[in-house]
Image (cartoon, rainbow, N blue to C red):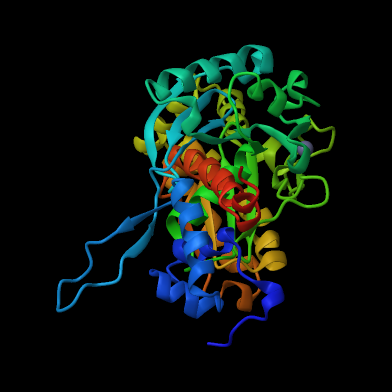
Amino acid sequence: MPRRPAAALATSGEVLRLIRTGEAATRADIGRVTGLSRPAVSLRVSELLDRSLIVEDSEGPSTGGRPPTRLVFNSSGGVVLVASLGASRAQIAVCDLAGHALARTSLGVDVEEGPDVVLPLVMDTWSELLGDRPLSQLRGVGLGVPATVEFAAGRTESARIMASWTGVAIPPIIAERFPGPVFLDNDVNVIAIGEHRAVYAGEADDLLFIKVSTRIGSGVIAGGEILRGALGAAGEIGHIPVRDGGGVLCRCGNIDCVDSVASGTAILRDLRARGRDVKTLDDVVSLVRAGDAQTMSVVRDAARMLGEVVASAVNLLNPAVVVLGGDVAETFQPMVSGVREVVHRRSTALSTRNLRIERSRLGPGAGIVGCAHMVLDHILSPEAVDALP
Ligand SMILES: [Zn+2]
């Protein structure tokens, strides 16, 4: 292993990264990998121990001699608060530093009531979930919101749901009650991060996540990282127009956007137009399960139009896996098979050679996992760790 030049001496944040990734498990490993002297390794290790980011595990293998003390990332060394807001439900949790939920709940919320109503409700729920845990354990907060987000500023841009969320700077509102950095991204991006990190990390680092629910949105993971675009608007697949959509005016002002012809809202509208008494997506699920011919036909049409747009996205992005999530995709099997069929027919042979098109395996929990990883990736980065007091 080549030694690093003195100018690039590894910091304690970099030593933590080596321990978290398994590249170094003992003080001797750290010295070997970084080229740091023994006293320098000791200094960094004791800094990390003081910050509760690592613990010593002396229970090594007992075969002859005293084993070197192993250094282990301390996932209990703090907590992060997370919330994934959808149009009508919020998944809220307290997670450890490995991203596992220590306490979680799901609330019915109407995001159209705006941040003044929804954010206090989310914060009250965090307080309840924290219970007796002191706020000193809190290391960061992460939120997924149903709006385009200017990530660096933590500010919402055009809200997909309602004007009251547009232009709101959320971190200062959270910071009044909870210490630590606040990270914000749009709801579909955090779900895409969750699906990737919990199910596909290391196996498929180019992933296209499509959420089909009341609305249609997508999140793009490219080379293991979320693709946000110049203004945070990447992945806005819902407003790509389809052919033969029937001339439906979309709420964005264009005609035949895939969101306006293939979303849960569109499926409900089309069934009602055919005289069916369907109030919610649950009613549609029951009809799909019963094999109702008219419902199946509406869902298949929606799948065909969605498939057309996904096929173009596959040509553009060449993902290893397309994950279909959201309550419509998760419960309507004809949706998944319909999209699969169209994509394999319409995308290039090379882009579909090894392509998998799968239903979400995480379901509604994906947003929580994604929010937690969004926070952890930042607060455990070498730069952030080195900046800790
Ligand atoms: Zn549109």
Q: Is residue 337 visible?
A: no
Q: Is residue 117 above or below residue 368?
A: above
Instruction: From the viewer's side, name the closer residue of 302 and 371.
Output: 371
Instruction: From the viewer's side, name the closer residue of 121 and 47.
Output: 47
Is 96 situated left or right of 123 in this image?
A: left
- Quadrant hosting residue 162: top right
**Picture coordinates of residue 283, whole percent (x, y):** 43, 25
The residue located at (53%, 45%) in the rendering is 370
Instruction: From the viewer's side, name the closer residue of 185 and 347.
Output: 185
**Picture coordinates of residue 368, whole percent (x, y):** 48, 38
Residue extending farthest to the front is 39
Locate ligand 1 by image quadrant.
top right
Q: Is residue 48 above or below residue 318?
A: above
- Quadrant hosting residue 22: bottom left
Quadrant where the image shows the C terminus = top right
Instruction: From the viewer's side, name the closer residue of 4 and 207.
Output: 4
**Picture coordinates of residue 219, whole percent (x, y):** 63, 50
The residue located at (41%, 46%) in the rendering is 362
The residue located at (71%, 24%) in the rendering is 172
**Picture coordinates of residue 179, whole percent (x, y):** 60, 28
Q: Please tell me how many numbered marks the rendered image carries.
A: 0
Residue extending farthest to the left is 63
Q: Is residue 180 visible?
A: yes
